[in-house]
Amino acid sequence: MATFKSGAQLSEQSITIWRIIQFTSWLGGAFILYSLLFFPSLGILLFWNVLIPIAPFIFVVAVGIWRNICPLATTNLLPRHLGLSKRKKLTTKQIGLFNIIATFALFIIVPLRHSLFNNSGLATAILIISMASIGITLGFFYEWKSAWCSGLCPVHPVEKLYGGNVFISMPNANCENCMNCVIPCPDSTPNINPLSSQKTEYNKLSGLMIIGGLPGFIWGWFHVPDLITITRLEDFLSVYEKPMVGLAITAILYFNIDRVIKVQYKRKLISIFAAAGVSCYYWFRLPSLFGYGTYPDDGLLINLSSILPLWTVPAMHIISTGFFVYWLVIRKPNNKSWVIRPEFGIKKAVI
Ligand code: SF4
């Protein structure tokens, strides 16, 4: 699949194969969206309890796969592929601003799962359609992935935190030529992390919030039950309390440790917080998928609690935490990027 014509350019055959995979993934996404609208129980199960739980693992191991086949990316890059994009370049400040907005969006949207999205196929569908509408609109104006995939997408800060030491660099199945639309390009920079770019205060703040804040935010999120009936605004907003307290605690912890350690240990500290975040996620998420959750009906995929032995839960904890600590903290950085940068293209003439 990953044969190259020259340099990092894909052969015609490889491009065709990737387009088929992207179209298949896009159809999968369309099916989930259709289910969310017309068969909400199925749609919610597929989106929140199958796709989303797999995503962090993919980000850690080979986020380039996801970057190549994400149905939202395929949709949003359509104007560029069809030659309909104005191909504008964002300034450094604009990219920093987009990154901080994406980080805030993540922390605002995710708690709403408890009060809205986890129990409403329609609300989840509207969320996806809204993101696609913003992304495709930006795609008509800005070059390649700069505005959405590496800018406003609320999932992108998590990709940058978890995808710091991927197993494999995939070919870039989206950008036909590199137009240097984001510097540094998160896809093409080896061992990227959320603080790889600190050109603006926005970059620094979003880096601090996602690296330091995510582990505590995740911990707090798993200590909030899904609310079935909401009668007061206070109930609706209560879902933010624990995630935000957790976020503040671990962000302050990270900030203070980062201030006192030597420069050569800062990258390791980011890896430790990345491992803490993803380990915390699966610590709670894996048991809840199989009926062992703190709130048994929340996030359930299939209830195996009457079949599996009790040691299943500690085994899940040990295996998942051990794996992520090894992968992100113990393994040496391997100098791999998410995808291989294609050959540089010729800049569009300014008319
Ligand atoms: S590979 Fe080049 S064109 Fe593609 S997103 Fe990165 S910087 Fe932009």
Image (cartoon, rainbow, N blue to C red):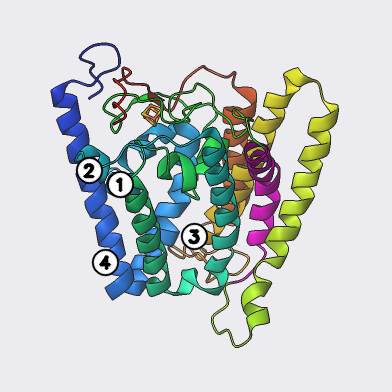
Residue at 55%, 29% (x, y): give it: 164
- In this picture, residue 276 sits left or right of residue 20: right
Chain part drawn in magenta: 201-225
Q: Which image quadrant is residue 11 in?
A: top left
Q: Which mark is residue 84?
A: 2
- Name which of mark 3 and mark 2 comes first in the sequence: 2
Q: Is residue 242 above or below residue 282?
A: below
Q: Are marks 2 and 1 in contact (CB under 8 Å)?
A: yes
Q: CA distance from mark 4 to mark 2?
A: 27 Å
Q: Nearer the viewer, mark 3 or mark 4?
A: 4
Q: Position of residue 14 (x, y in %)?
A: 19, 26
Q: CA distance from mark 2 to mark 1?
A: 6 Å
Residue 164 seen: yes
Residue 158 seen: no
Crowding at label 3, few (<14), some or many (≥20) Cα neighbours within 10 Å? many
Q: Are marks 4 and 1 in contact (CB under 8 Å)?
A: no
Q: Nearer the viewer, mark 4 or mark 1?
A: 1
Question: Residue 203 lies in magenta, yes or no?
Answer: yes
Residue at 26%, 66% (x, y): give it: 34
Q: In the depicted view, which residue is nearer to us: 351 or 152?
A: 351
Q: CA distance from mark 3 to mark 2?
A: 46 Å
Crowding at label 1, few (<14), some or many (≥20) Cα neighbours within 10 Å? many
Q: CA distance from mark 3 to mark 1?
A: 43 Å
Q: In the depicted view, which residue is nearer to us: 226 or 294?
A: 226
